Image (tube, grey):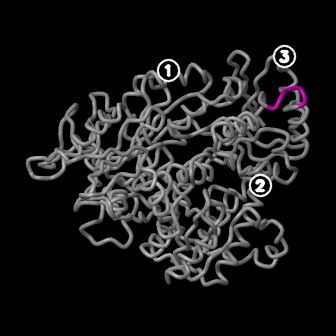
Amino acid sequence: MQIEKKVEGNKVTVSVTGMINTETANLFNDELLSLDYSDLDLTIDFANTDYITSAGLRVLLIARKKLTEDRMRIINANSLILEVFNTVNFHSIINVISTPVSEEDYRLSIASLLAKRLETGNGRIAYIYKDREYTWQDIEVGSHILADKFAKAGVKKGSHVGICALNSINWLLAFFAIQKLGAIAVLINPALKPNEVNNIAGHSDTTHLCYGEIPGKTTFELYQQACLDGQNVQHMFDISDNIDFAECYNEYLDIKDKYRTTYFADDASVIIFSSGSTGMPKAILSSSYNLLSSVEPLNNGMKMASDDVNLAFLPMFHVFGLATNISAQLLVGYHSVIPDNKTPAGIIELIEKYKCTVFNSVPTMMLAMVQDKSFSPEKLSSLRLSVLGGSATTEEQMNMLRKLMPNNHFGNIYGMSECAAISLTRYEDTIEHITRTIGVPVPDMELVIRDLKSGEVLPTSEKGEICVRSNTMATCYYNLPIENQPLDEEGWLATGDIGMLDEDGYLYIMGRTKEIIISGGENISPGEIAEAIAALPEIADVKVVGVPHEVRGEVVAAAVILKDGSSWNEEAVREKLAGSLAKYKLPTYYAVFESFPLLGSGKVDGLAVKKQIIEKLGL
């Protein structure tokens, strides 16, 4: 056995080559005893360590006695050493950071990666929900029991199984159960009304639907009526919080050897929905490889580690939440705290309680948190990283956030459901980069700016449509004809966003070719809302636009023209729309017009309408 020490101030790294057993443990002990423990920050690197026996564990225990939990860690332990630690539950005593993510891990299916996570860290905490800890073994047991229930109801490889629920531990169990069967998880926004869920189920050929905790006054019975009567969904499964799958452990013992088929990483595994500018739902079909490889830049660029504690605020039906709360977590091995109270005060409380180090979010929530009466800088002092997506922050807002959270590093990410990560700010980037750009294209991402009319690639600093090409992109739009598929003949995806690249390779967003409204990170289709408003008997014409909002970035505004003889009753309109549109889609503002400004082509001038609404309302 050989031991090397690297000293940088109070930070000491001890690297061990060979095996730590009864014969070599004394030498290992002598080296550790020679250190000055008064202000020591100790890292023990097992990258070249073959194995450790009980004699070596005792040496580690003695060293740990002299240090607090945050001042001693073990890194790069191989699978044999991790198995030893799991056997004696050493993770509860010493912070063990597993081997860095390998290239092979990104090429596993989600089901296979879950099995590997179980093998290397089954005793470690995976998730915390409602103050209850769930280890990877708990996730294995619960998801396996659910997989058995799904299989008995006819779910098999290629089946489409919907999940419509708020983030919860049972949402995760359902997701992993679907992956174990080689089925496709259809991720549905629980804020949608039952008729909207039924429409999505029909469009995506969803035959089985899991429903759990849902917001508002919608009941499970309404879901059942809409979906089962709609002749799309054949079976429904209750995954609400009152179901505790851990109570069915005996069932696991009988089926633990079943559902172990190995699936290819490129097999279809997930459908995520994204609104289009026309209101047509787009079911974006992705594979495990698409989802796992797309988070590699985030894991590496933002220095994610297995000792991080992630606050899983982002919804898991959304690509950003799926990436950070499942994909990245499976690869790196950190654990997540799932909030059941997603108010600013509730999030602050959980970050403080569990000393969360990572909180990826949208600017809306960050700004709401620091404005909440319960906020104090001390409560969020454990945060080291927050990557923001969905909308931009101003330089003034970012300066405020950094002042209030000086320990927290902020990043900016740009992506879409079709391609989770397109660009990302670098860890060392300045505040100007974070607020004015959306970073640089991630590795292996081809990105060009094309002229809107000719389609020609534009040079640096010229504005056009952002187009991307990468192996991490989704497969296709499910159930849409070839002319509506996202890729061109050469595999390029036109994002619909207007931008430019500067001389240093940084990407700037400067608008959208489509009229999507981004409100608090949610993509909202003006066409869908306009259609619902136009169906009201008093409405002659309607134009829906996004208008600026200090916290949410944008909110929905509706410009309406009334039919002759009709009167305007805003309260009645709001009440009618609340029955057919999700809450986040409802217009915040209304403005009554006599007529709409028109372009030379005769089409409504959306920009002019937006400008007039802002003037009318004094925004």
Q: Which residue is mark 2?
A: 134
Mark 1 neighbour class, 10 Å CA radius: few under 14, some 14 to 19, many 20 or more: some
Range covered by the magenta-colored residues: 65-69
Residue found 72% across the figure and 52% down from its top: 79
Residue 117 percent coordinates (x, y)? 68, 56
Q: Secondary structure at mark 2?
A: strand
Kindly report the distance in space between the C-alpha atoms of the residues bearing marks 1 and 2: 37 Å
Q: Going from the N terminus, do you reach mark 2 or mark 3 first?
A: 3
- Asked if residue 372 lies in the magenta stretch, the reply is no
Badge 2 amino acid: Tyr
**From this viewpoint, is residue 47 visible?**
no
Kindly report the distance in space between the C-alpha atoms of the residues bearing marks 3 and 1: 36 Å
Badge 1 amino acid: Asn
Q: Secondary structure at mark 1?
A: helix
User: Which disc, if any, is residue 399?
Assistant: 1
Residue 533 percent coordinates (x, y)? 35, 59
Q: Going from the N terminus, do you reach mark 1 or mark 2 first?
A: 2
Residue 99 percent coordinates (x, y)? 66, 45
Task: Spot the residue most to the left.
Answer: 600
Badge 3 amino acid: Ser
Q: Which residue is mark 3?
A: 38
Residue found 58% across the figure and 72% down from its top: 223
Quarter in which the C terminus is drawn: top left
Which one is closest to the eye, mark 2 or mark 3?
Answer: 2
